[in-house]
Amino acid sequence: YRDKHELVLRRHAEQPNAMWQSDHTLLDILVVGTDGKPVRPWLTTILDDCSRAICGYTVFLGAPSAMNTALALRQAIWHKTDPAWPMCGLPDVLYVDHGSDFTSDQLAHTAVDLHIRLIHSTVARPQGRGKIERFFSTVNTELLTTLPGHLAPGVRNPHPVLDLTSLDTAVGEFISSYNQRTHSSINTSPKAAWIG
């Protein structure tokens, strides 16, 4: 039954900041680590469910943690210095998976303090997080393929050139562009949908 009717049961927010999704992905790129060795970075993203706008993110080395999630959430909540990135505020709901950082006491206490309902997706059912997973796919196919160190299929040892700061800058510029271009699912830009 669930497999047949999954599309009917998908979550959808009716207005901006009603529900944000957050998740992490291991990026398909090698960067120069702090010790000078190649390392794969992670990306944590906060996405507004209604508008598909990226409200906050963080790029980091090492495993996902409650601290990295908190940094992305802080950026999502606060006003940005860039007027082209107006997304901010507090969501009613933060929709996440069952990663240890998302089930941590730190995130639970933060959610209580900020009056955010924390909802965990069903275990082993990624369909409910399709919007954020689609964004990660877009980052991998549209941004990372243009950068040195990309882990393309069939390439064994790409030479990393970028450091974490350079990658963070590239991701930030990509998100700025992503938020301002027309999204095929909503027929407007995420920024315009969020403002509207």
Image: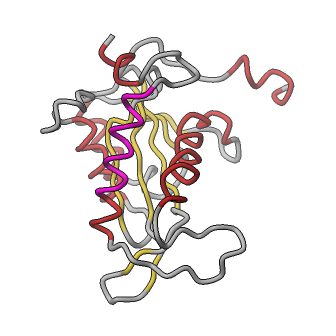
Of residues 22 and 185, the one nearer the viewer is: 185
Farthest residue in the left direction? Answer: 81
Tell me which residue sits at (39%, 40%) in the image: 46
Q: Mostly what secondary structure, the magenta segment?
A: helix
Residue 124 in picture, x, y percent from top left:
70, 47
Total of numbered circles in the picture? 0
Residue 157 in picture, x, y percent from top left:
59, 83
Can you say whether 12 is above or below 73 in the image?
above
Is 180 a magenta residue? yes
Tell me which residue sits at (49%, 73%) in the image: 149
Residue 187 in picture, x, y percent from top left:
52, 15
Q: Quadrant of residue 74?
A: top left
Q: Is residue 141 left or right of residue 87?
A: right
Is 73 a magenta residue? no
Q: Is residue 95 left or right of residue 105?
A: right
Of residues 180 and 124, the one nearer the viewer is: 180
**How are the colours assigned in the image?**
secondary structure
Can you say whether 107 is above or below 190 in the image?
below
Name the quadrant of the C terminus: top left
Q: Quadrant of residue 193?
A: top left
Can you say whether 161 is above or below 172 in the image?
below
Residue 121 in picture, x, y percent from top left:
59, 38
- Segment tinted magenta in the rendering: 169-181
Tell me which residue sits at (52%, 56%) in the image: 25
Of residues 125 and 53, the one nearer the viewer is: 53
Name the quadrant of the N terminus: top right
